[in-house]
Amino acid sequence: MSTAHGLLGLVISMFAILAGATTHAQSASSASDRRAAERATTAYRDAWISNNPELVMATLTSDAVIYPSNLKPIVGADAIRRFWFPSGQSTRVVAMELTIDGLTIDTDTAIVSGVGLLTFVTTANGDNTPPRSQSSWFVNILRRQSDGGWLIWRRMWGDTRN
């Protein structure tokens, strides 16, 4: 019996050592993944500030879905492009602040949440609207891509009322 218990103890010890090594590797990977997921979220912000629709769309997967505040979901890159960049109207972002207050990673999926403030001007038929600011909460669900980078797969937000 004692030999069996000794062997069992050795096996448990080996698993503990391996689990510790795996946890350490995952911690290092997780720190790197966390930075990459944060960069993907700030890339989204920076793309909007650049006022370049191609850069904005490049932060999303082709099968992305957005859930705008108080609207039905908008599915796929083409539909999102039409929603955000309708013909005959343009939106110029004046400022966009994002504060990340939550980030969770599980293998190839990251969830990033926070709050933001967007200030923009719209132009339709040559007429500019006065700048408008909108504060909101957001949740981005990112997917790891084959190149190791992260893109937004799902994005939802809701306006906050003061």
Image (cartoon, rainbow, N blue to C red):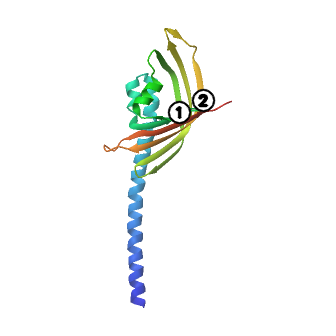
The amino acid type, in three-letter code, at marker 2 is: Ser
User: Height in image: 92 above or below 99?
Assistant: above
The N terminus lies in which quarter of the figure?
Answer: bottom left
Q: Position of residue 133 (x, y in %)?
A: 59, 23
Per the model, the C-alpha gap separating discs 1 and 2 is 10 Å
Q: Residue at x 42, y 55 (%)?
A: 27
Q: Residue at x 51, y 35 (%)?
A: 73
Number of marks in the rendered image: 2
The C terminus lies in which quarter of the figure?
Answer: top right
Instruction: Give the crowd class for mark 1: few <14, some 14-19, many >=20 residues within 10 Å.
Output: some
Q: Residue at x 59, y 26 (%)?
A: 134
Q: Residue at x 50, y 42 (%)?
A: 112
**Lower position in the chain sequence, tag 1 or tag 2:** 1
Picture quadrant of residue 142: top left
Q: For the view shown, which residue lies furthest in the left direction?
A: 147
Q: Which residue is mark 2?
A: 135
Q: Position of residue 25 (x, y in %)?
A: 38, 57
Secondary structure beneath dot 2 equals strand
Residue 98 tag number: 1
